[in-house]
Image (cartoon, helix red, strand yellow):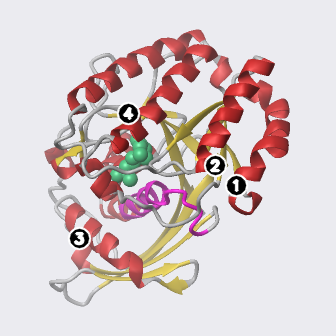
Amino acid sequence: MTEKDFIPKSYPAAVEQGEVTWQSPSNIALVKYWGKLEHQIPANPSISFTLDSCRTTTKLKFQKKQKPTADFDFRLLFEGEEKDAFRPKILKFMQRVEPYLPFLKDYEFTIETSNSFPHSSGIASSASGMSALALCLMSLERQLDPEMDEEYFTRKSSFLARLGSGSACRSIEGELVVWGMHNNIYRSSDLYGVPFRDEVHDNFRNYRDTILLVDKGEKQVSSTLGHDLMNDHPYAETRFRQAHDNLDKLKKIFRSGDLSEFIKVVESEALTLHAMMMTSQPYFLLMKPNTLAIINKIFRFREETGLHLCFTLDAGANVHLLFPEKEAQETQEFIEAELKQFCQNGQYINDRVGSGAKKMA
Ligand code: PMV
């Protein structure tokens, strides 16, 4: 599919008013997206586990205007309260997606949104938030075009979510989603995420992600600025090639179930992401002393137990702990006894791989 396929020709049905609610999860990248071209086209392909309990719930209410106006009209409620700080981001999103959803200025919207994870936990809510909003808007478009098929609905939801926040396009489906053109991944696209359809070993079923909240403050580097740092980065081309190679490696690993190899790719991806930030101009150091303390504890735990706990990081200090279901009990005991002390207020979130967004009744 190309961008043009997402521009509707006309809508057969009329819709006056209504409401729709979607719940959409966060995701955690195994091969990281870092660096982009215009229109949120990724500089390299990425793959993520869709999460299960870290979710945004968004209700979209819509009422047709008497006459269309020149402005986007929306109210924004976050956890029940008017949230002006989020308006610019939503406005920008609406402007970007308008060519693909030409009805946006015909309606007054109320967007009511809340997260399952604690507010300002340092967990990126843009992936779950933007995907939930994209799905709500697609539900309205489906009412305007009742013949729309499921495949189009899903692809376009991911396409729109990408225009809100790149990684959000990986939150629509589960359990592993690839975004970005890769020669050896069937139907992969720069425009939207697609489920990873190759064989996946049982070792990866119900994989766990426990998120250690090391630093719950505001992000030090916004994603927009972060991606821009790759534009004239001295190691950019090598890094982008490496992401392609790491996806090839993961493809084999998912088939074989080799957890030791999985750890090598995933941890190297996390450290590379941070290395890119440390070697850009300007440079950023986003790990905190507790991030490093946790990583060292993980290395020691693996050496002592032979278990397969590994870490990954986003563009911040929090640590995602990935581990197989069959090692969950021993690993959780270790987290409680040894790692919890490095979290702000002892806080962490137990999550696992999930199957994607859900429409609520
Ligand atoms: O979706 P954005 O623009 O916020 O970028 C997210 C980038 C990382 O979280 C660091 C990596 C990824 O692939 O999710």
The residue carrying mark 4 is: 46
C-alpha separation, residue under disc 2 versus residue under disc 3? 48 Å
- Identified at 56% across, 51% down, the residue is 288
Q: Are marks 3 and 1 in contact (CB under 8 Å)?
A: no
Q: Are marks 1 and 4 in contact (CB under 8 Å)?
A: no
| Residue 258 picture location, percent across and down | 60, 12
What range of the chain is rendered magenta?
A: 119-137
Viewer-nearest of discs 2 and 3: 2
The residue carrying mark 2 is: 290
Where disc 1 sits, the SS reads loop
Q: Which mark is residue 343?
A: 1
As shown in the figure, which amino acid type bears the numbered disc 2? Asn
As shown in the figure, which amino acid type bears the numbered disc 1? Cys
Q: Are marks 3 and 4 in contact (CB under 8 Å)?
A: no
C-alpha separation, residue under disc 2 versus residue under disc 1? 8 Å
Q: Earlier in the sequence, mark 2 or mark 3?
A: 3
Where disc 2 sits, the SS reads helix
Q: Kindly tell me whether mark 4's CB lies below 8 Å from ligand 1.
A: yes
Q: Earlier in the sequence, mark 1 or mark 4?
A: 4
Viewer-nearest of discs 1 and 4: 1
Where disc 4 sits, the SS reads strand
The residue carrying mark 3 is: 103
Q: Kindly tell me whether mark 3's CB lies below 8 Å from ligand 1.
A: no
C-alpha separation, residue under disc 3 versus residue under disc 4? 32 Å
Viewer-nearest of discs 3 and 4: 4
Q: Main secondary structure of the magenta part?
A: helix
